[in-house]
Amino acid sequence: MKKAKWLFVTLSTALVLSACGQGTDSEEDASASAEEAETQEETEDDSDEEEADADEVEEAETDDEPVNDEEEEVEDETAVDDKTEEAEETEESDESTEGEGADSSEGEGSDGSEGEEAVVLEGVDYYFSDDQMMATYRVSTDHTVSHDEEGAREVVQTWVDGPDQGGLYGLFDGSDVTVQSVTFDGQTAYVSFSADIWELNLGSSGELMLSEQLAMLMSQFGFDQTQLLVDGEVPDYFHGHLDVSEPFTAGDASDYQDFQ
């Protein structure tokens, strides 16, 4: 009977111990499973966080790309503007240079023209005899001509055409004489008349007046020596009275009275 109780007690103890062992294992298994689940969740959370961070970084990079593009566009526009400004400045500089060049050329041409126009003989004096051919008078005028050969030819032609004042007489009155040319050479003025001059009938005193008056006209252009020509040639004598083969010399203007 005691053996049976002892056996019973032993079996009960074994069962109890077995049950305790299984419970411990189950709890340990459960605890391990819980820890594994928690670890897995943490791992998944970490993965989610990493993915979220990666998405944020990617979004940030995506957001940055337009900014970079905008910056590049701004830089490109700035570069274009700079080039445009440089081109405009260069063009303005060229225009300014051309403008200055153009202004300088015009100024020089204008100065040259003004200089030529400034060389004139103002207030020409003409010399005519009285209507009795007794004396030569000086007639002052406001006539202005160029101080050159053409101006001198114009003065001689006016003299040939005769005076406007009454009481004076032109030595070429009624003739068709024309002044062909006036040429300056050295200290001498060469005055060529048409061959009509041979038709004049002045006498010796009239011929002398002609040479004196002509010489006084040319002296206003700075030539004290005057050579008379007919058709461009030097004659020996003028109507057989006056030797005109050599230049004749002008007198002094103060020797002639002003005609009143």
Image (spheres, helix red, strand yellow):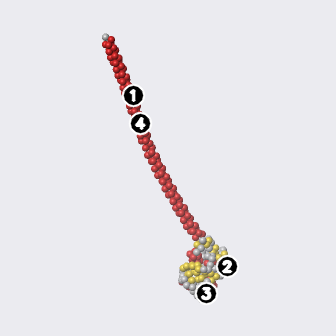
Give the residue drawn at x 36%, y 26%: 29
- Looking at marks 2 and 4 on the same chain, the residue that comes earlier in the sequence is marked by 4
Give the residue drawn at x 61%, y 83%: 247
In this figure, which residue is indicated by the disc labeled 2? Answer: 252
In this figure, which residue is indicated by the disc labeled 1? Answer: 35
In this figure, which residue is indicated by the disc labeled 4? Answer: 50
Q: Relative to 13, say whether 177 is above or below.
A: below
Judge left or right: residue 159 versus residue 78.
right
Q: Is residue 64 visible?
A: yes
Q: Is residue 126 visible?
A: no
Could you tell me the amino acid type at mark 3? Asp
Mark 3 or mark 4, whichever is nearer to me: 4
- Looking at marks 3 and 1 on the same chain, the residue that comes earlier in the sequence is marked by 1
Could you tell me the amino acid type at mark 4? Glu
Secondary structure under tag 4 reads helix
The CA distance from mark 2 to mark 4 is 123 Å
